[in-house]
Amino acid sequence: MHRHISHPIDRFTPVEHVLRHAGGELIDQPDLPLPDAGAPWRWAAIVWPDPSRCDGWAALEWSHGDRGWQLPATLVLGDVIEFGIVGLGQDEHPIANTTARWFGWLSDLTPLAAIVVGPYPDASSAAATARPLVDEVRCSQLLATMTDPDPCTHGDGA
């Protein structure tokens, strides 16, 4: 007898998420649980390593749009994206233990969608997984600026 066992997808099993965008705004986002307390406050941001920051990461928070988040002009392939939600108290400060975060990285940006790979447990894990794409983009940019079709000859024909 063959028995089929179903295994739920792990909370941090990264997959490609196709998030629609229109008019320069991301109109889809990953589902995050609403906080148990306080007024929910959401954010989206690009995050990158910055050793001068106390937590080691800098962030560019995205502006709210009419229907979602305005896509930043500096968004590039391989960027780590954080989506989050927290409960705010009456004093408009975050309530402890109400924060949920979702980390992913931008693998492609089409005229209609942002393809984001995630979720990851933290920004470091997302950045490490995005690294091969970032390296590929950097190498492509270097090769595109070289005037010598064979960089190994250094233009001397040898």
Image (spheres, helix red, strand yellow):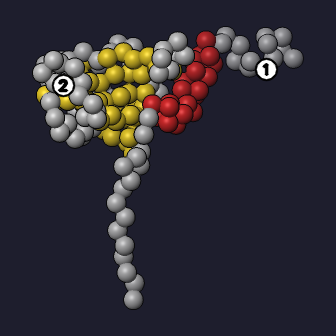
Mark 1 crowdedness (10 Å alpha carbons): few <14, some 14-19, many ≥20: few
Residue that protrudes farthest toward the bottom in the picture = 1
Q: What residue type is labelled 2?
A: Leu
**Nearest the camera: 148 or 2?**
2
Taking the spot 40% from the left edge, 34% from the top edge, the residue there is 104
Mark 2 element type: strand
Taking the spot 41% from the left edge, 49% from the top edge, the residue there is 13
Tell me residue 111's x, y (percent): 30, 26
Q: Which of marks 1 and 2 is nearer the N terminus?
A: 2
Name the residue beneath numbered marker 1: 152
Residue 76 visible somewhere in the drawing: no
Tell me residue 141's x, y (percent): 57, 17
Q: Quadrant of residue 120?
A: top left
Q: In this view, does 64 lie above or below 40?
A: above
Mark 1 or mark 2, which is nearer to you? Answer: 2
Q: Is residue 60 above or below residue 79?
A: above
Name the residue beneath numbered marker 2: 88
Q: What residue type is labelled 1?
A: Cys
Mark 2 crowdedness (10 Å alpha carbons): few <14, some 14-19, many ≥20: some
Taking the spot 22% from the left edge, 20% from the top edge, the residue there is 93
Mark 1 element type: loop
Question: Is the N terminus in the top left, top right, bottom left or bottom right quadrant?
Answer: bottom left
